[in-house]
Each structure stands twice: as C-alpha cells, then as structure tokens.
Amino acid sequence: MKETFSASADTQKYILSGIRYVCENFKERSPGSHSERKAQKYLKGELEKWSDQVDMENFPVHPGAFFGWIPPAGIIGILSVIFYWLCFKGPVKGVALPIIAVILTLFATSCLLFEFLLYREYVDFLFPQKTSRNVMAFRRPSGEIKRRIIFAGHTDAVNEWTYSLHGGLKSLAPVMAGSIGGLLFVTVFDIIWLISVFAGNTYTSAFWLITGIIQLILIPFFIAILFFINWKVVVDGANDNLTADFIAMGVLKEMADNDFRFENTEVCAFLAGSEEAGIRGSAAYAKAHKDDLSDVETVFIALDTMREVEQLQIYTNGCTGTQKNSNAVSELIYQAGVKCGIEMPETELYPGAIDSESFSRNGLLASGFCGVNHDPKTYYHTRLDTPDNMSEECINLSLDICIEAAKLYDEAGGIDAFREDGAKRFKHGHNKF
C-alpha cells in the first residue's frame, strides 16, 4: 500500500462513474422497492471483486411509516381547530369533541416524538410491509482478526421534499416550525380545553377567543405540511447517499488494487437499505449481528451526503440529540481528517440521524461524518440530487479520510488510543458502553 494510503485516480474515477451508473440504471430506489433491492444486488457483485466475503440479507420494513404519519397529523390539526370552533361558537356542546380532539392530537404528537425525533418503530405496523436488504462486505487481514472497522453508507433514496426544492430553508423553516409548533400548541390547548369543559366552562373569558384565533392562524401551516412530501417523485440520491456507498466500497477497492491487507484489522463496507425510512436497515443489521460484531473490537463509521467540503462535520450524537455516539470513534475520524489536511468540527444539534446511531443504540462503538449543510440547499432531498451535482473534491477528500482512519486504527492497535483525546475534544457522545 502506498505510504500516503490515499486513493488512486482510478478509484476516484470509479466512484464517480459508479454513482452515475446506479442513478441511470436503478431509478426510484425508495426504501423497500424493487429498484433498491436490484441496486443492492448489483453493488454486492461489485464488492465481491475486492472482498473475501459479501453478505446480502433481506429484512422486513414498513417504509411508509417514517413520513406517512405527517399528512394525518396535518389533518388532525385542522380537525382540532374545527372541533373547537364548533363548541366555542357553534351548536355543539358537551365533552365529546374535546375528548376526541385530545385523543387525536396526543396521537399525532406521539408520532412526531417516536417516529420522527427518536427514530423508533412506533406506527410502522399500520403501514404496508415491504422487503429491503443490507449488504456487508469483509476484507480479512493477513493474520488473526483482532479488530474490525466498518465504513457505511445507504443505497436507498428519498421521496422529494417539496419545500426543500422550492426555497430551501426559507420554505422549510416556516412550514416545519409552524406545523410542529402548531401541533404542540393545539395539543396543549386541547388538554386545557377538556379540563375546562369538565369544570363547567362557559367560554366567557377573552382567553377562549384569543386562543381560537391563534388556532385559525395555524390552519395554513397544517395545510402546507400535507404537501411536505412529494409522493410521486423519488430523487436520484447521487449525493444522499450513493457518495457514501461508493466511498465505503472505494476503501476496499483501493486495498485490493494494491494487494494490501492489514495484519490484524478487518476492513468492511456496509451498504444499508431503508435509511430514508428511519435508519431501519442499519437498525435491523445491528440488532441481528450485535453478537457477531462483538467477537472482536469493532468500530463503525457512517457517512452521509458527502457534498460540501466546508460542511464536513463529525456527528457525535443523532436522533435529534437523543442518541450519543462514541467520542473515541469521533476522535479517530478527527485525527484522520487532520492527516488529510482538514479539522472537522463536532456538529451542533440537528433534526435527523445517520446510520451510526443504530449501532450506538445496540451498544457498539460508532460515529460518523457528513458533508451536508444544515441550512439545506436545494439539492437536498430533491430531484436536483443528481450525478451532475456532486463535489468530486468532497468525495475524494472523504475517501482519503476513511483510508487514513483505517490506517490510524490499525497502527494504534485499537480504539483505546483515541479515548482520552476524544473525551477532551467533544462535548457530546461517549467513550464506553
């Protein structure tokens, strides 16, 4: 292996052409779709060129659940307002409508919490089941396996976000803030309203008029959120997240092209399915293989949307800040970045998750780094996420960082060498499980 342990021009070219090939030949790779499964089968065949073992496993998924609760929640918000006005100024009396409103809004709020913020399978059973698949490739060391490092991306693509295409954050922010804030507002109000009705409320205070007007103002936001997802368009997903898939594959290709193996470190590429359905693929794999991956020390590095060099950041926590990743693995990523000429900061709190959180949730050492702007650009989750809209610079740098991380991890003899510095450098995350 070359002393710099960086990627060759041939591997760099392969990544760009490979992403274009998948986008052109496996369109509409939504979670659990036939196209997603076909793409995974193709990528498995590619990985077999450079790996000693490649596993492809199917798993059940309910892909409609992660975003599918949003339109019903918007309708519930509208109904809650209508119910209130029917009682406040209309002919309806009694507790029936307040009770229904509380039940519905609490249900919608719980979907927001468990599906969208915590990435849990909360209402998945209410949606149709499909079959998705994961791919895992192993490149053995020349000697005994004493440690393992896994680089990961995901192969599926998302349904288009309407407001990301039409205005980016300027459109996303008001729609999401107004609808989410509005849902929380009507939920709290409905509880107060129900208690008040049981206490004999006569709606004589100005409070009831003012809050009723506020609820009317929220209706446009509830209507807007109904169109948050364009269910007719599945984006190409060139950046999100074929860049990460092919970077993970590129590490193994570069090692194979140089006929190189570490003495005791196994290097793997994991290509998840159904990440856009709420990190379901990585969650299924981590749960099924927790014991297998615990046979030796294993670290997991997720990548996602490797598009903007200036936005390369280390993700020490995810699932909207509720799931901590490993500071030690984060330190490994950081030091690899420094070796490649970039000091990546720790990301601030953001509303989302990457595949590392699935592994952290199952007690494994995981973290990740991404190159996506948290002020979403119009390519993010839209039809503009095409092979013509990629950053070759960001892809090549990210690939070099992964290769350097594998080298540093092997040279250090394990993750313990990164724990102390990781604990000092990063505010979030943790070192031990």
Image (cartoon, rainbow, N blue to C red):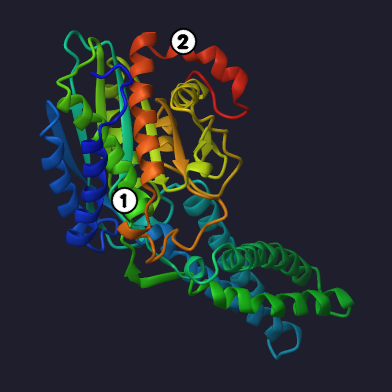
- Location of residue 252 in the rendering, given as x and y in whole percent from the top left corner: 22, 29
Q: Which residue is mark 1?
A: 274
Please say if 128 is above or below 418.
below
Give whichever of 177, 308 is nearer the camera: 308
State which quadrant residue 248 falls in.
top left
Under mark 2, the amino acid is: Ala
Q: Any mark on residue 63, and which?
A: none
Q: Left or right of 133: which side holds 63?
A: right
- Mark closest to the chain's N terminus, 1 or 2: 1
Give whichever of 131, 190 is nearer the camera: 131
Identify the secondary structure beneath mark 1: loop
In 3D space, how far apart are the residues under numbered discs 1 and 2 (Cα atoms)? 34 Å
Under mark 1, the amino acid is: Ser
Q: Left or right of 235: which side holds 131?
A: left
Identify the secondary structure beneath mark 2: helix
The furthest residue to the bottom? 91
- Location of residue 76 in the rendering, given as x and y in whole percent from the top left corner: 55, 72
* Front position among marks 1 and 2: 2
State which quadrant residue 271 falls in.
top left
- Location of residue 28 in the rendering, given as x and y in whole percent from the top left corner: 26, 63
Identified at 43% across, 42% down, the residue is: 354
In the rendered view of the protein, which quadrant contains the N terminus? top left
Give whichever of 138, 118 is nearer the camera: 138
Q: Which residue is mark 2?
A: 417
Q: Say whether residue 93 is visible.
A: no
Q: Left or right of 262: which side holds 336?
A: right
- Location of residue 309 in the rendering, given as x and y in whole percent from the top left corner: 48, 42
